[in-house]
Image: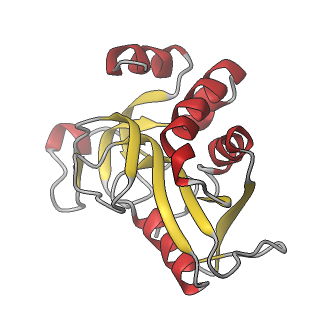
Amino acid sequence: MIDKEHMLSIFRSTEALLDGHFILTSGRHSATYFQCAKVLQHPEYLTAFSVILADEFEAMKPDVVISPAIGGIVLGTEVGTQLGCRTIFAERKEGKMVIRRGFEILKDERVLVIEDVITTGGSVKEVMELVTDNDAEVVGVGVLVDRSNGTASLCEKQFSIVELNAVSYGDDEVPNDLAAIPIQKPGSRHLK
């Protein structure tokens, strides 16, 4: 297993851990941002992280792996490959998470949800609702980086490779030193 400091050094070396003033997908402000796509473009890291997640959930015997678009797709696909099961993704259409492109979740399927980064877990919760709306079972939630500070408890069987105490702020809580830095919105969802 990779320790947290080693993991952070991997993120920094691949420019996947950024410093500045960011608005996260959740809408919260932070001085740090994880651009997991930057680390997951390297096959050695993608495979290593996917094997860790697959090993954690293999006993759950999922039929399908689903990820929220866009961030979780690459990781979810590789986890599905490691587990030898079908992989799909959910995406936003008119602001709502949906399953499309011919993908489907069948009744009673055992579904593993994989995401790259969570702060509030909102996208994962929406995907979990899609699973249950299709009369299937969420058997687990696997995450590369959990930056929720322990507040995003999404599933009984939840596992994160790295948990970080990442500070984030609501619009009315942003400290002056952070507010002085120009805002960047690198996430996959456009915020108003």
What count of labels does the image hold?
0
146 sits to left or right of 73: left
**Residue 96 visible, this orientation:** no
Q: Position of residue 41 (x, y in %)?
A: 69, 29
- What colour scheme does the image use? secondary structure
Q: Residue at x 68, y 62 (%)?
A: 89
Q: Is residue 150 above or below residue 144?
A: below
Rendering quarter of residue 108: bottom right
Rendering quarter of residue 157: bottom left
Q: Residue at x 67, y 18 (%)?
A: 44
134 sits to left or right of 154: right
Q: Position of residue 1 (x, y in %)?
A: 43, 20
Q: Position of residue 162 (x, y in %)?
A: 37, 33
**Residue 126 visible, this orientation:** yes
Q: Nearer the viewer, residue 3 or 41?
A: 3
Q: Residue at x 72, y 61 (%)?
A: 88
Q: Position of residue 177 (x, y in %)?
A: 18, 37
Q: Residue at x 63, y 31 (%)?
A: 40
Q: Nearer the viewer, residue 19 or 93?
A: 93
Q: Is residue 14 above or below residue 174?
A: above
92 sits to left or right of 88: left
